[in-house]
Amino acid sequence: MDSLEYWNMRAESFGGTNAQTHASGCTKGYMPRFIELLALEDGQSVFDMGCATGTLAAPLAREGHSICARDFSPRMIDRLQQITRDENLPIDAAVMAWEDDWAECGIEAGSYDVAVASRSLPYRPDELRKALADLDQVARVKCVVTVSASTAPAYDARLCAHLGREIPVPKNHVRVIDVLAEMGRLPTLSYIPFHRPMRFTDRDMAYLELRKLAGREELDAREEEQFERYAAEHFTVSDEDGQTVYQLDYRLDVQWAFISWTTNQANVLERGR
């Protein structure tokens, strides 16, 4: 399953309140703290890249902020557009990918006060540099990104140990800070601790999400057998109001690095005063 297919499949449950959604960790704990750290001023406009179904865009729009929301998943955008219509929110939602030419897509330099990318940055070096530069170009005042600063959510240390797989040292937040330093920015860093519940209403989705936490490499026959036994042992099955729920029987704790910086446009304005 490629990335676009996967996120299109997730669109129906992502960011809602049912049990399957809890795997994303979008609605409880993380987002209120993100918004608190974001500390928007009244009336500031926001560019939200990798917006998914509006887990950030919708609450900010409800507070009166004008939002431009972009995501590469058409189904995610369809859901956000439906929310926008239903609540009459000030959100402009459309499909756009990180690798696209943003200017050609109508996203001009200095178009918004604040640019954010909540857990959506690409991590390959050339893609990361372009992504951070594009965000910096769009925002008049500041940019904010969040990236993992822990083994989870990319890996489950307990599962990898069971399979005999090594886990890379988490460096995504360090890479972001290094690139920003090369750009001449002075980033500030905070952390958002979060517990990822791993609750699902579908067995196949439960196993798929856990399988992702073993790493991108294919499982060999031995690992496949070990994984199936591990998943069967550690997913509890319960009935909640007539709905079957699969839940991992231990915690996955995540540390999200909240990285913000003042953009060049803001620096120029400050020097001109």
Image: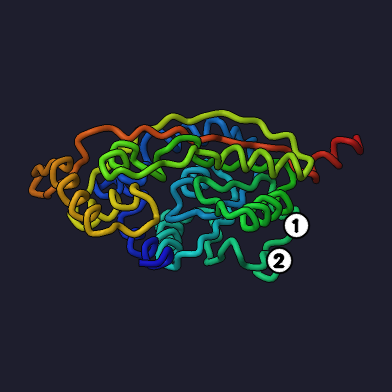
Q: Position of residue 20 (x, y in %)?
A: 25, 49
Q: Which residue is mark 1?
A: 109
Q: Residue at x 27, y 45 (%)?
A: 163
Q: Residue at x 38, y 65 (%)?
A: 8
* Residue kind at label 1, given as amino acid type: Ala
Q: Is residue 237 left or right of residue 209?
A: left
Tell me, yes or no, whether the two marked residues, 2 and 1, touch with CB atoms within 8 Å.
yes
Q: Earlier in the sequence, mark 2 or mark 1?
A: 2
Q: Is residue 119 left or right of residue 209?
A: right
- Residue 195 in view: yes
Quadrant where the image shows the N terminus: bottom left
Q: Residue at x 28, y 41 (%)?
A: 159
Quadrant where the image shows the C terminus: top right
- Residue 78 in view: no
Q: Residue at x 66, y 45 (%)?
A: 114
Residue with the most extreme bottom position: 104
Q: Is residue 80 left or right of residue 23?
A: right
Q: Position of residue 72 (x, y in %)?
A: 50, 64
* Residue kind at label 2, given as amino acid type: Ala
Q: Position of residue 228 (x, y in %)?
A: 17, 52
Q: Which residue is mark 2?
A: 103
Q: From this view, report whether residue 46 is shown above or below residue 261.
A: below
Helix, strand or loop for disc 2: loop
- Residue 25 lies in what quarter of the image? top left
